[in-house]
Amino acid sequence: DVGTFQKVTHIPEPTLCMASSTTHQWQLAWSANDVLLACWGSAVMVAEVRQKHVGTLSVRFAGVAHAFQLSKAVVLGVAAFDTQHLSIMASTPNTEYRVADGVNNCSAIIHLVCTLTGSVLCTEHLPLQAVASQCRFVSTNDGHLQYFLTGQDVVAIERRTVCDHVRWLISSG
């Protein structure tokens, strides 16, 4: 808390995630004024900042409300999708997927929408190849527009309604 020069909490490095401290860095994003999203390796944590009144003093503290791990994926960034869901960009090692010229067998970038407890609701594979250390994932405050930045590409992710998606499916054949 920069206003009081007080340490709010310490979130330890996850011990069971598929990463080493030399290859991955913490990724942090605010979901709301009192909700901090943190990811490292394959682990995602949702920390809630609370305030406790002790006499005339007000002390802030945080605790991890939800934590989960992605299986066989490394989180590149996390943002709020809405108040109950997360938008996660991740890379999967040695994933085979089809591209216009045939089959490509390399690390794939995926976009997931999941609940705060880690239940995956949908997954999209993006036709990108990127070095994880060069990737950034940023979002607008309301989560309606998100950007995934690689060393060479900028991908805009816009949330759509079901009707928008059906219209796109019909027009795309």
Image (cartoon, rainbow, N blue to C red):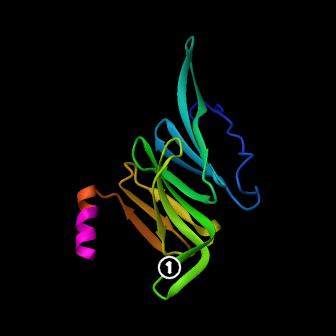
**Residue named by callout 1:** 98
Q: Nearer the viewer, residue 166 or 78?
A: 166
To which quarter of the image does residue 163 belong? bottom left
| Amino acid type of the residue that numbered disc 1 sits on in the rendered structure | Arg
108, above or below 65, in the image: below
Residue 96: horizontal and vertical position, in percent? 58, 75
Q: Is residue 130 visible?
A: no
**Residue 113: percent from left, percent from top:** 45, 53
For residue 148: magenta? no
Q: Where 84 falls versus 151 (above or below)?
A: above
Q: Residue at x 55, y 57 (%)?
A: 77
What's drawn in magenta, residue-wise?
165-173
Q: Nearer the viewer, residue 5 or 38?
A: 38
Quadrant of residue 107 within the rendered picture = bottom right
Q: Which x, y percent locates residue 139?
A: 44, 55
Left or right placement of residue 42 versus residue 168 in this view:
right
- Identify the residue at image location x=22%, y=66%: 167
Q: Nearer the viewer, residue 1 or 157?
A: 157
